[in-house]
Amino acid sequence: MSVAAPEIRPAAWREQTVSLGMWVFLATELMFFGGIFMGYLYLRTQFAGEVAQASRHTHEWLGTLNTAILLTSSFSMALAVRFSQLARRETVQRLLWVTAALGAAFLAVKFIEYAMEWHEGLVPGLHFTIVENARTTALFFFLYFLATGVHALHLTIGIITVLWLSWRLRKPPFPDARADDVEVLGLYWHFVDAVWIFLYPLFYLVSLAS
Amino acid sequence: MSYLEEGFTLRSWLTTRDHKRIAILYAIAITAFFFVGGAAATIIRLELATPQGDLVTADTYNKLFTLHGVVMVWFFLIPSIPATLGNFLLPIMIGAREVAFPRLNILSWYIYVLGGIFVLYTLIVGGVDTGWTFYTPFSTMFSNTHVVEAAIGVFIVGFSSILTGLNFIVTVHRMRAPGMTWFRMPLFVWANYATSIIMVLATPVLAMTLVLLSAERILHVGIFDPALGGDPLLFQHLFWFYSHPAVYIMVLPAMGVVSEIITCFARKRIFGYRFMCYAILGIAGFGFLVWGHHMFVSGQSMYAGMVFSMLSFMVAVPSAIKVFNWTATLYKGSIVFTAPMLYALGFVGLFTIGGMTGLYLASIALDVHLTDTYFVIAHFHYIMVGGSVMAYLGGIHYWWPKVTGRMYNEAWGRMAAIIIFAGFNLTFFPQYILGFLGMPRRYHEYPPEFQVLNLFSSAGAAVLAVGYLLPLVYLGWSLFRGPRASANPWDARGLEWKTSSPPPKDNFVAPPQVDAVPYAYNPEVPPA
Amino acid sequence: MNSPPRLRVYAVTWIALMALLVATFVLAHFRLGAWNPAVALAIAAAKAVLVALFFMHLRRSSALVVLFAVVAFFALAILFGLSGTDYATRAIHPTPWVAPDRY
């Protein structure tokens, strides 16, 4: 693969370079979440039955709703990226708003879930009142709060960045550099979605068969 | 106008996006931390000069070796070559004007400083006593020192590492000058590229491990506590999954430096260039497969231990290939014993000894006897100090004229190198014997029969300290009074020697055209 | 660069993702034994692949980018797999729960 110096083909070169940078960053993010997945793998393989029991305390309807919301936000984000390649500034701006709104809706549902879980005494170390299968349930919910909490943090950063980018696009022009920003932000957003795609079955769908 | 003359204010330095200035910012910061870690080592060796624990209490001693490890690993060795020499030279060596993301670069330095502030804060409020390895359940349940603060400091500095690695990877892929194909790049670039891959993939796992550690210490849920269903070895698997590749982060760039120096001062192209490239990648790749060799006696399954032991033997192979190739490069070369060359030759010998003792430790049966003794300490100091630090100093001397535009005094340089080599061996060789005899590590006192060897070791440490202080003197002096350096004072090959000393802000006056093979030192002899 | 993908591609991908979501939710309510986690993870993987290929444009990206995506997964696989050799073969002797001693 030949490497074109920036002076020769600046626009395409910049897009591919920042894109590669974001993919490398996403690799680090995958490894970051990997630590939590390792802890989960340990707990699920060593205490399969107890983990199944513990997971019944999660709210699968809210989790499923949230998955649908996040998948749809990925759809709107992907459309934003597509239209940014056509320099359709206003369309991109609207799609970014939709994406941020759906992300905020996810966080709202998550907040409701966390409030319910606090009320039900499911927060280990802080407010934990479960007696049956207490130890594994505590560990399960420790991982649950850590995983979904770190995920929510990443999503929040994504929402803020989407809003910031949308604000920057409130007026013309729409230079290639901004289109590149939309694209790499899109990569980040889809990654956050992909992490949730795995968190959902691991925490919510362990044992729903009655 | 050189990059040094583009602004003389503090602000021009602290807001720079020039990879060369960022390299110097890093160099200053890591030198400061080197002496912090060195101060801890000084007190340790003073205490160990006598068998009784009479200089410091056991608790203080624990805090000292923890400080020494945390500072030396994360605030000196890991950033040392990549963030200083790598930042300065990598773009120039591939013919680029800058790194791919200059703003991320200066951000990485600020993140490093922030992490450093946390660690210094931890030190001031009383330190941490878990060892740099933070093993559970001591760190999560029993230690009453500032574990979380220290963990935060290391967590933060990890991101400095990640950003540096990310930058290097994208720079090498996207910013090579026309004609600079992969197999024309200097081995220093290959080494830093492979190191960057490790930084980017391994460091995030450490970050999450520190989060788990801190959460467990605060909430006591039991993820690492067997009484509550957790597993202390879960921590060790996660910790060493990063920390073993981390030692390759510390040694691969050093190997890159050594390749540059040996070719220049043997006046010969590197023997087996392609194999050197594959060996670099092989070390980086295999380095991810061996972490369990730190856990042979931890309670890990014996069968897993056997797998890790076998893989640990295999990872020695690419390192050995590199040692053979350096030796073959020296063979029939026209060797000049400059200060950088003394450091590079020292690296080859001391790394070989350290590497071979690594094989002893990779043998499970031997490791049962040698683990947690001074044998292990000697092994990794031979590699980290006899290897990496010497290569770092060699690189500092070799590229000093390029970076500063001044030549240092060669006689002082050679003298310091010899003092360091002698002091190093006097300090650490006795520790192999002490380890074999059974002296455990991380104790502030020991049985009297070990005193003679410990005295040798402490005496060596004094010599080593003198050796490390000397460059501060003569290198510092050269900045003001050293003779001005030409573009290529060593008559070396490589793009960095084709630009002025020091280079201009954009590295080159005109974009370089690359058509030469690397290390074109002896063109009259065709490559094998 | 080429022209961007047609809108249809994104819409079909989204529909497929929602369909897979419904499928995984429904299947989780059936007692399939060891197949439950296998099916759930397989569907999750399928969703992730769809997101990567069509939303993240991995299908149109250079080989280098695909390589980076794959290498990270590979590194995770090593973490899980080699740690797994320990957990799979360690002789664990369960003992009664005992409250830990603390200072």
Image (cartoon, grey):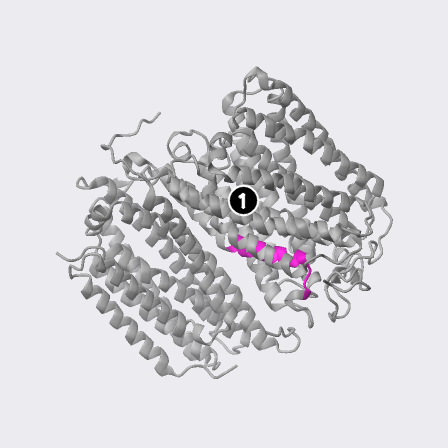
Q: Quadrant of residue B470?
A: top right
Describe residue A75's horizontal placement relative to residue A19 as left or right. left
Q: Nearer the viewer, residue A158 or B68?
A: B68
Residues packed near mark 1 inside 10 Å, few (<14), some (14 to 19) or many (20 plus): many
Magenta segment: does it hold B370?
no
Residue at the image position 49 percent from the left and 24 percent from the top: B59
Q: Nearer the viewer, residue C103 or A86?
A: C103
User: Where residue B465 sits: x, y (%)?
Assistant: 70, 31
User: Where residue B308 sits: x, y (%)?
Assistant: 45, 45
Q: Which residues are magenta?
A: B184-200
Quadrant (top left/top right/bottom left/bottom right) for the C terminus of chain B: bottom right
Quadrant (top left/top right/bottom left/bottom right) for the N terminus of chain B: bottom right
User: Where residue A87 sits: x, y (%)?
Assistant: 48, 81
Mark 1, chain letter? B
Q: Disc 1 designates what residue?
A: B115
Residue at the image position 52 percent from the left and 67 percent from the top: A20
User: Where residue B372 sits: x, y (%)?
Assistant: 50, 31
